[in-house]
Amino acid sequence: MLVTIFYAPTDSFRRLARPKWLVPLVASAILALLGSVMVISVVGMGNLTRMELAKRPALVEQLGHQQVDAFVAEAEQSTSRRYFSYASAFAATPLLTAFAAVTTLAGLLVFGAETTYSSVLTACAWGSYCASVVTLAVSGLFLAVVDDYTIVDPQYMVALNAGAFLDSATTPPWVRALASGFDLLAFGGMAIQCIGLTALSSRVTRSQALAVTITVHILWVLVKASWAALLG
């Protein structure tokens, strides 16, 4: 199913004797870890730290270029920060997927559907897995052809969302966060998720699955935009 989910998702879900979410969750976590190792090894923690600081010009002005250079040098040499980034990448995807499944289940119940958390988590996990595979593949291709790693922004490295085409120097972070909601990769994962929701439960209609999945996505984008606005 790790392969068939890409070209025969409906049949793949229907062949499941019962909901199975562990394999896609673990696979997604491993793929996220591999992506983190790849980006940090190629781009470097120093460059990544400098780019994050550059998104907050007020903070950079307050710190001064000398202090910024000190932060960048510390990040480049810090083994603990590197491994913390790896651990965060490994844990983040399963945790976010589990939370997305909770909100999706709540939405489905509000819309009058009948299903179980296990079924919803399975659908969300396989949607996340498909997105993770494409993200890792496209990120690897991008890093293989780019020459200047100082301009690599991991959040917008996979240029399949509108936010990737906005200039970070002139566009407010919250606007880029909103624009990133128009994401072909996310839409693909949502499509897999909707197929899974309807295939794993006969009491979830296509319209219910689509409405709830889109609503959860919009809420997530609004949360990211609000957080970006708070950080400035």
Image (cartoon, grey):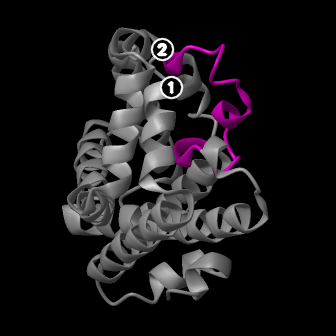
Q: Quadrant of residue 109?
A: top left
**In the drawing, what numbered circle is on residue 54?**
1
- Tell me the residue at 26%/36% (across/down): 110
Q: Which residues are magenta?
A: 153-174
- In the image, taking residue 12 as reference, residue 122 lies left or right, namely left
Q: Which residue is mark 2?
A: 57
Residue found at the very far front of the displayed protein: 66
- Quadrant of residue 78 in the image? bottom left
- Position in image of residue 123 (x %, y %): 39, 66
Seen from the viewer's position, the closer of residues 61 and 134 is: 61
* Magenta stretch encompasses residue 172: yes
Instruction: State the image coordinates of residue 29 (x, y, percent, origin top left).
Output: 34, 71
Density class for disc 1 (Cα within 10 Å; few <14, some 14-19, many ≥20) is some
SS for callout 1: helix
Say which quarter of the image contains residue 16.
bottom left
Camera-nearest residue between 117 and 173: 173
Asked whether 125 or 26 is in front, the reply is 26
Location of the C terminus by quadrant is: top left
* Residue 150 within the magenta-colored segment of the rendering: no
Q: Which of the two residues, 74 or 202, is positioned nearer the viewer here?
A: 74
Q: Which mark is drawn over residue 208?
A: none
> In the rendered view, would you say 199 is above or below 117?
below
The answer to whether residue 15 of the structure is visible from this angle is: yes
Q: Residue at x 38, y 79 (%)?
A: 27
* Residue 182, position as x, y percentages in the image: 63, 35
